[in-house]
Image: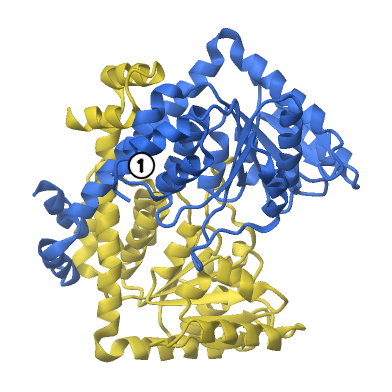
Chain colours: A blue, B yellow
Amino acid sequence: MERDPSDLVERALGADRAAIAKLISLVEQGGNSADAAVARLFPRTGRAYTVGITGAPGSGKSTLTDKLIGLIRATGDEVGVLAIDPTSPFSGGAILGDRVRMQDHATDEGVYIRSMATRGHLGGLSLATPQAIRILDAAGKPFVLVETVGVGQVEVEVAGAADTTIVVVNPGWGDAVQANKAGLLEIADLFVVNKADRDGTAETVRDLDAMLDLSGALEWRPRIVQAVATTGRGVDDVWDGVAEHRAFLEENDRLKVRRDARLRDELHSIVRARLEQRVAGHATGERFEKLVGQVSRRELDPYAAADELLGG
Amino acid sequence: MERDPSDLVERALGADRAAIAKLISLVEQGGNSADAAVARLFPRTGRAYTVGITGAPGSGKSTLTDKLIGLIRATGDEVGVLAIDPTSPFSGGAILGDRVRMQDHATDEGVYIRSMATRGHLGGLSLATPQAIRILDAAGKPFVLVETVGVGQVEVEVAGAADTTIVVVNPGWGDAVQANKAGLLEIADLFVVNKADRDGTAETVRDLDAMLDLSGALEWRPRIVQAVATTGRGVDDVWDGVAEHRAFLEENDRLKVRRDARLRDELHSIVRARLEQRVAGHATGERFEKLVGQVSRRELDPYAAADELLGG
């Protein structure tokens, strides 16, 4: 796949679906031609508004996403959707599950839906997702929704790296507390209590409120919206909540500040990935094995061995 | 804390509990004096046999660990126990929960129990745990038990980095499948179906067996042991299973091969951590902010910016 991606980039800028698909596969895999492709389309990015949607498995994220797609399309806007599937360490495969439902929109040319997974290292997802967003951005989608399962630090990080982040919880004892434990409270700009036709909705709203109170004075206090995504109830309110948060960010340059902060994190990640490649270069081969042998025989401690690897 | 740890190391080698505690706190925090301490005690390590114990929350890992401590102590051997608490991203605190139970052994001088958590970066736990094991090893514990909650890639990795890894599951539909999804099947040397007085025990054993069959020809086929940790039933069998696996590893140098493989991983991690420190050096300051500004204005792409940071 290390071929010149300029042709693919040109076609993606013209919103060619096949080219978009191939470019996203390229950034999933990573590597030099992925970097080159993103570098090339980068000047055409920065216009899309990104919305992260996260929550526990089964909370109804996909249904909500599906309904938001319909709502955005009803205004005539196009939308790109990335459904992030954490790779199972066992099968290496992506779990599609109920995301199949979203494929109702598959025949709509104004919607581009894509499941993403990364084989291999943990950092892959955090680096590949912003690149995939850029591809959809450069292809002219004014909105990009990024749906992730809110379990695991990387998934939470990915969902949090959006302009507005929606955290979906369900009514029922402990769900708000679970969200808190998973670090979701920290990244939420908007809470959706989904399945709000069930018992315990008021308590969950109250729990979230109480936890927000505990967070101290917030510049932005996340709104709590009740919804029943399956029937569409409250989905308008969710989208209004996104618009309200967007208006807040667009005052006083806050959106730029937020995006620049993400850029800093991304630069750190890229530098780290580049250095990882150097580790791979350092920590193999005959010299490495010789050091492993010395450490194994306790002739050298691991730190001294690492310093020798890096010094050489 | 950047003081010379040689005095602490000397006292830990003499099994001084306070010194052991301080050294483990030191490696939790990481940094130069932690590395120096481990380097110093490293020649005295390699004797302890390590057993990882993992499984879903509530599977009874802590109770099993507690019973194994009693069993080891009954033979007169000393034992060190590390209970790994994944740090909540929200509170930064360790969840002790039912581990308090193990503190029954707290007055026994032959048992050293310690909860470990890492504040901060993900890699911290994978690097700090082997160092804490070495401290207990150098302090003369012939056995070190490492208990982790089998959720999240890092926790699974930490539990798998033992001489023998026990995976605890419970009877009931889907538990074996969950363990599979979490990557626990790959690291198991021994399965314990705990709470085996409940319905569904036979099915769970059968599920595990079927999944092992699917794994193809294994050099070592993990034994499946039934236990009721709360009453002590089957705990002897668990320990016999560990002994059996140990005997297998001690044939034909397999234990050395396994430990050397861990050492390679650890050297990679140390080299990576060292390079991370360099990232921190590169990716801050005026020059970094100038590049962030250029990327933010789309004058430079992120990869070109990273290369400039690394090249300079």
Instruction: Give above or below for B288 relative to B81.
Output: above
Amino acid type at image mark 1: Ala
Residue that extends furthest to the top in the rendered view of this protein: A252
Instruction: Give above or below for B191 relative to A124.
Output: below
> Is residue A176 visible from the viewing direction of this image?
yes
Residue at x 26%, y 78% (from the top left corner): B257
Q: Quadrant of the N terminus of chain B?
A: top left
- Position of residue B260 in the picture relative to residue B237 (left or right): left
Residue A312 point in image, percent of width and height: 8, 49
Front-most of residues B227 and B211: B211
Instruction: Give above or below for B248 relative to B275.
Output: below
Residue A144 point in image, percent of width and height: 59, 32
How many numbered callouts? 1
- Position of residue A138 in the picture relative to residue B259 (left or right): right
Q: Which residue is mark 1?
A: A34
Residue at x 40%, y 29% (from the top left corner): A41
Residue at x 26%, y 66% (from the top left corner): B263
